[in-house]
Amino acid sequence: AQKITQTQPGMFVQEKEAVTLDCTYDTSDQSYGLFWYKQPSSGEMIFLIYQGSYDEQNATEGRYSLNFQKARKSANLVISASQLGDSAMYFCAMRELPSSNTGKLIFGQGTTLQVKP
Amino acid sequence: GAVVSQHPSWVICKSGTSVKIECRSLDFQATTMFWYRQFPKQSLMLMATSNEGSKATYEQGVEKDKFLINHASLTLSTLTVTSAHPEDSSFYICSARDGGQGALYQFFGPGTRLTVL
């Protein structure tokens, strides 16, 4: 069965510094996708970044990058130059990609990030 | 990106009443919609997967008679919480997939906060 684990319930980072949010996953499938979402206090889920299991390069989107280590089954999110607006809850999620799959996402427990001024 | 709306954004109701939550894809056709439930400081838990024109598939432990899902068109899915009780108070989020099973991304609605008195 698929499983996503985020071991950091809460993290602090100083404004303008970089921070890494950990995510490990477990799946028996060879083809899967990994997602990171940000959820501010308003509750909306904001898509940040995606990494496919067959992608050779780590995904990057602006200040977000995904440190994908397939052999270790980890997909850590790196946020560079933290801003106060980055304070939120962050979720790692996975879906298996075969077409027979319904496409549902499995979410980790989440990490609450607080950026200090 | 694609836009998903939810209505209402928040609702307060008396115990024993039923509450309907709407999820609409505004600028794309969503063959599949997903309903999640989230308690404070916790992760999203998938309740059911809804495909247009067919019965929803509920996750284990979710009462289908309690949480009625109707996906009547390619742009609208509804979740009805029947005979709501205080323990049903939660944040309900829908998401919609743009396209068929091969489509990669889900787009999330802003969520509905339900409080049952």
Image (cartoon, coloured by chain):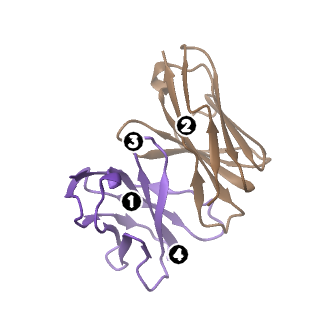
Q: Amino acid at mark 1?
A: Ile
At label 1, counting other C-alpha atoms closer than 10 Å, the crowd grade (few under 14, some 14-19, many 20 or more) is many
Q: CA distance from mark 2 to mark 3?
A: 26 Å
Q: Is residue A54 visible?
A: yes
To which chain does the residue with label 2 belong? B
Residue drawn at 39 percent across, 59 percent down: A4
Give the foreground label among 2 and 3: 3
Helix, strand or loop at mark 1? strand
Give the number of the disc on residue B62: 2
Residue drawn at 39 percent across, 41 percent down: A41
Q: Which residue is mark 3?
A: A41
To which chain does the residue with label 3 belong? A
Color used for chain B?
Answer: brown
Q: Amino acid at mark 2?
A: Val
Helix, strand or loop at mark 2? loop
Helix, strand or loop at mark 4? loop
**Badge 3 and badge 4 both on one subunit:** yes
Q: Amino acid at mark 3?
A: Ser
Which label's residue is closer to the chain start, 3 or 1? 1
Residue A18 vs residue A90, the one in the foreground: A18
Which label's residue is closer to the chain start, 3 or 4? 4
Q: CA distance from mark 2 to mark 4?
A: 28 Å
In contact (CB < 8 Å): disc 2 and disc 3: no
At label 4, counting other C-alpha atoms closer than 10 Å, the crowd grade (few under 14, some 14-19, many 20 or more) is few
Q: CA distance from mark 3 to mark 4?
A: 33 Å
Q: Which residue is mark 1?
A: A4
Q: CA distance from mark 2 to mark 1?
A: 21 Å
At label 2, counting other C-alpha atoms closer than 10 Å, the crowd grade (few under 14, some 14-19, many 20 or more) is few
